[in-house]
Image (cartoon, rainbow, N blue to C red):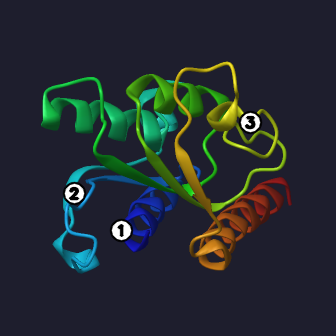
Amino acid sequence: MRLAMREAVKAAETGEVPAGCIIIARPTDPLAPPMSAHVLARAHNQTELLKDPTAHAEMIAITQAAAAVRDWRLLDTILYVTKEPCPMCAGAIVLARIPVVVFGVPDPKRGGAISVFNILAHPNLNHRPEIIAGVLEHECRDLMQQFFRDRRQEGSAAKG
């Protein structure tokens, strides 16, 4: 999750909503240290840069990981993201068959994973990943809140 946080900081530095995502190959040895994980993809939000509403961190990372494994099925992976995936990203996670999703802060207004739409656990879908929520939640929340605080202050300064 710390690698995803680094990506989120990159997003914030460029004026993007600070969401970062990492996809790793799931370790075959359960006792393997976290540092031995093979990173398949790393991304951050780029909607403003690319002028693309689909350029969320998860979408970009899923595309990168699929290219890395040369398959659209990301069966032996773990996705880490700083903020609960939106409905679009949750749908892509289901389609990619990602087995484990780890996120930091929930999104009670637009959360597509479990908070609002519950896409990742929907019983009618053919794939339901394991969900691990709240990892580094305070750090992820602080980053998000600081970003929006700064944006509001910039807006106030521009008006004044």
Mark 2 or mark 3, whichever is nearer to me? 3
Q: Can residue 54 be seen by looking at this rendering?
A: no
* Image-based side of 97 in relation to 71, left or right: right
Name the residue: 48% across, 33% down: 93
Q: Earlier in the sequence, mark 3 or mark 1?
A: 1
**Residue bearing mark 3:** 118
Q: Tell me the distance, in whole angstroms, between the alpha carbons under discs 1 and 2.
A: 10 Å
Q: Amino acid at mark 1?
A: Leu
Name the residue: 54% across, 49% down: 130
Q: Position of residue 47 (x, y in %)?
A: 50, 34
Secondary structure state at the residue bearing disc 2: strand
In the foreground, 20 or 23: 23
Name the residue: 54% across, 21% down: 126
Q: Quadrant of the C terminus?
A: bottom right
Q: Amino acid at mark 2?
A: Val
* Image-based side of 56 in relation to 17, left or right: left
Q: Amino acid at mark 3?
A: Asn
Q: Earlier in the sequence, mark 1 or mark 2?
A: 1
Which mark, by number, is residue 3? 1
Q: Position of residue 34 (x, y in %)?
A: 28, 76
In the foreground, 47 or 123: 123
* Image-based side of 148 in relation to 76, left or right: right
138 versus 103 height, above or below: below
Q: Earlier in the sequence, mark 2 or mark 3?
A: 2
